[in-house]
Image (tube, grey):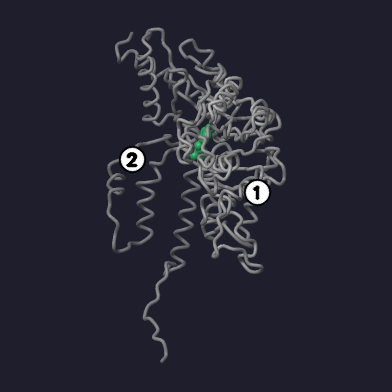
C-alpha cells in the first residue's frame, strides 16, 4: 500500500524569505546604529512600566509576525539592557563586546555550529584558538583546554581535574575514597566562584581555606604554607592552591612563582584564576606581571571580560591532557569514535567538560584575535591600565576623595570622603547613595565592594570604548553629587 503523504509539512523557515531578509538587514543596521551612538545615551535606565508589562505577557498559543516582535525588542528590551557596552560602564568585571564578535555570533548561530565531536570545522577552530591562548600564556603546545560559558565554569572544570588528580580513585570511588577530607587553599581575596565550586564538588565550603592576604592584597604565601602543613598533620588531604592573577576587588596579582614553588614542594595542584588578568599576556610591557603562570597546572580566564568579546565565553587550560580527559570521559557506545565519517575524531570536546552539546563559541575568538592581532589587543590592555592609573591619580590629587586600595592594574576603589562626615556608617551610606545616583542618572556605572571593611566605589576597566574624558566625567560627577548631598542632607 502506498504511504499516505501528509497534507502539510511544517518548517520553521520563513514563508517569505525576501521579507525576512529585509527585516534581518534592518536589524543589523539598527544594531550598528545602536553601537555607533552608544556614547549619546545614558549608561543605564531601569525598564519602564511598558517593558514590565511586555515581560509579564503569557506564552502565546498562536504566533504573530516577527516584525511586531522585533518592534517590541526595540521598544522594551534594547533600551533597558545592563549597559555594559557603554564607554562609561566599569561595573563588576563586565566586558564591552565588539562589533566583530556580534557578527561572528550571528555567523556561528546561522550555522548552528556545534563543537563537541568529530571531523568538522567547529572542532578544529576551537582547537586552534586554544592553542593560541596556551601559547600566549607560555604554556606548552601539548596543553589541553576547552572554551566554557564563564570564568566560574572554567574554575569548576579545573578544580574537578585537580580533585580527581590528587585524590586517589576519586573519579571511580568518590571524594573520600582514601578516608580523608580534601582541602583547597586560596587568599581571602579570591572570587566567590571558587567557594561555589568547592561546594559543588563535594569538598565543602569549610574546606576552602581562605588565607589572609597581605597589605597589597596578594596571598600571604608563608601563611598558606603553614595552613597546608597544619592540615596535613591533622590527616586531611591538601588538593589545590588557587592563585589569583587579578583579584576581583583590587586587581592584585599573587606571587605565582612562589605559589608554583610551594605547590611543587607540597605536592598539590596549582590552579590560577586569571579571569581578567590573563589578558596582560597580550602586552609585551605588562606580560611580566604574570610571571609564574606558565607553571600552573591549570588556568581559568574569561574572553568576555578583558578580551572584550561578547558573552559568553570563558576558557580553561589544563597542562595534562590525560588528567583533563579522565575527569570527563565515561564510556558510552553512542559516543565511541568511528574510523571514518563525521565521528572519525571521536568526541574531543564532549570528553573535556560538563557540556556534551556545545555551541560554536570559538568563532568569535578566532575572528577577533585575527582581526586585531595581539599587537592592537596589547595596546588596548595598556590603555586600560593607563586609564586606571589616571583615575587613581585624579583621586589622589583631590583632598575630598580617598583611594582605598593600590590600583596596580585596571581596578580602582575609592570614595568621597568630605571632612564634614566622620561617622564610618554615615560615610558608607553617603557613598552608596552617590553610586546609586550615578547609575540612576545614567552618568556612569562603576560598581562597589568592601575594602578592609569600608564601602568602596569600584571601577573595573575592561572597556575598549572608554576615553580619558570619561574618567574626568566620573570624578566630576562623584564630587558634584557628593557635595550636593551634603547640603540636601543637612550635613553642612
Ligand atoms: C568574573 C570573575 C570570575 C567569574 O567569572 P564569570 O565569567 O563571571 O563566571 C572568577 N574570578 C574572577 C577573579 C573574576 O573576576
Quarter of the picture containing the C terminus is top left
Is label 2 or label 1 in front? 1
Residue 342 visible in the shown view = yes
Quarter of the picture containing the N terminus is bottom left
- Label total for image: 2
Q: CA distance from mark 2 to mark 1?
A: 49 Å
Residue bearing the label numbered 1: 322
Secondary element at image label 1: helix
**In the image, residue 410 lies at what x, y percent?**
57, 27
Please tell me which residue lies in front, 220 or 35. 220
Ligand 1 within 8 Å of disc 2? The answer is no
Q: Which mark is residue 488?
A: none
Query: Looking at the picture, does residue 226 appear above or below residue 418?
Result: below
**In the image, residue 488 lies at what x, y percent?**
30, 15
Q: Quadrant of residue 47?
A: top left
Residue bearing the label numbered 2: 47
Amino acid at each position: 500500500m502506498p504511504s499516505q503523504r501528509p497534507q502539510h509539512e511544517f518548517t520553521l523557515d520563513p514563508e517569505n524569505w525576501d521579507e525576512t531578509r529585509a527585516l534581518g538587514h534592518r536589524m543589523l543596521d539598527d544594531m550598528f546604529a545602536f553601537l555607533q551612538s552608544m556614547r549619546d545615551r545614558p549608561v543605564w535606565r531601569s525598564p519602564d512600566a511598558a517593558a514590565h508589562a511586555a515581560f509579564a505577557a503569557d506564552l502565546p498559543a498562536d504566533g504573530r509576525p516577527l516584525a511586531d516582535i522585533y518592534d517590541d525588542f526595540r521598544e522594551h528590551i534594547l533600551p533597558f539592557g545592563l549597559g555594559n557596552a557603554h564607554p562609561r560602564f566599569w561595573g563588576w568585571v563586565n566586558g564591552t563586546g565588539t562589533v566583530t564578535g556580534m557578527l561572528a555570533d550571528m555567523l556561528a548561530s546561522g550555522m548552528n555550529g556545534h563543537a563537541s565531536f568529530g571531523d568538522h570545522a567547529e572542532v578544529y577552530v576551537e582547537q586552534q584558538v586554544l592553542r593560541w591562548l596556551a601559547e600566549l600564556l607560555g604554556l606548552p603546545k601539548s596543553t589541553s583546554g576547552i572554551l566554557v560559558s564563564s570564568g566560574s565554569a572554567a574554575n569548576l572544570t579545573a578544580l574537578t581535574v585537580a580533585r580527581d588528580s590528587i585524590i586517589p580513585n576519586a573519579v571511580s570511588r568518590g571524594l573520600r575514597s582514601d578516608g580523608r577530607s580534601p582541602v583547597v587553599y586560596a587568599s581571602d581575596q579570591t572570587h566567590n566562584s571558587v567557594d561555589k565550586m568547592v561546594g559543588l564538588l563535594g569538598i565543602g565550603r569549610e574546606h576552602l581555606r581562605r588565607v589572609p592576604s597581605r597589605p597589597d592584597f596578594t596571598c600571604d604565601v608563608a601563611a598558606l604554607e603553614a595552613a597546608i602543613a597544619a592540615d596535613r598533620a591533622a590527616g586531611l588531604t591538601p588538593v589545590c592552591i588557587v592563585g589569583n592573577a587579578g583579584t576581583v576587588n583590587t586587581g592584585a596579582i599573587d606571587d605565582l612563582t612562589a605559589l608554583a614553588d610551594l605547590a611543587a614542594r607540597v605536592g598539590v595542584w596549582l590552579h590560577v584564576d586569571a579571569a581578567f588578568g590573563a589578558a596582560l599576556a597580550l602586552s609585551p610591557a605588562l606580560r611580566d606581571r604574570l610571571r609564574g603562570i606558565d607553571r600552573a597546572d591549570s588556568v581559568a580566564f574569561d574572553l568576555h571580560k578583558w578580551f572584550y568579546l561578547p558573552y559568553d565565553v570563558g576558557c580553561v587550560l589544563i597542562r595534562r591532557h590525560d588528567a583533563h580527559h579522565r575527569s570527563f570521559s565515561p564510556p558510552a557506545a553512542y559516543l565511541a569514535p568511528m574510523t571514518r565519517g563525521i565521528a572519525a575524531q571521536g568526541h574531543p570536546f564532549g570528553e573535556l567538560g560538563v557540556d556534551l552539546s556545545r555551541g560554536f563559541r570559538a568563532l568569535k575568538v578566532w575572528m577577533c584575535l585575527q582581526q586585531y592581532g595581539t599587537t592592537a589587543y596589547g595596546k588596548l590592555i595598556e590603555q586600560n591600565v593607563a586609564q586606571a592609573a589616571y583615575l587613581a591619580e585624579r583621586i589622589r590629587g583631590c583632598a575630598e576623595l580617598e583611594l582605598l586600595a593600590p590600583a596596580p592594574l585596571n581596578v580602582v576603589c575609592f570614595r568621597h570622603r568630605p571632612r564634614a562626615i566622620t561617622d564610618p556608617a554615615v560615610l558608607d551610606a553617603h557613598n552608596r547613595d552617590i553610586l546609586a545616583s550615578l547609575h540612576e542618572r545614567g552618568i556612569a556605572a562603576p560598581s562597589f565592594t568592601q575594602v578592609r571593611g569600608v564601602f568602596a566605589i569600584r571601577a573595573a576597566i575592561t572597556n575598549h570604548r572608554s576615553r580619558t574624558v570619561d574618567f574626568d566625567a566620573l570624578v566630576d560627577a562623584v564630587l558634584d553629587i557628593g557635595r550636593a548631598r551634603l547640603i540636601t542632607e543637612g550635613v553642612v
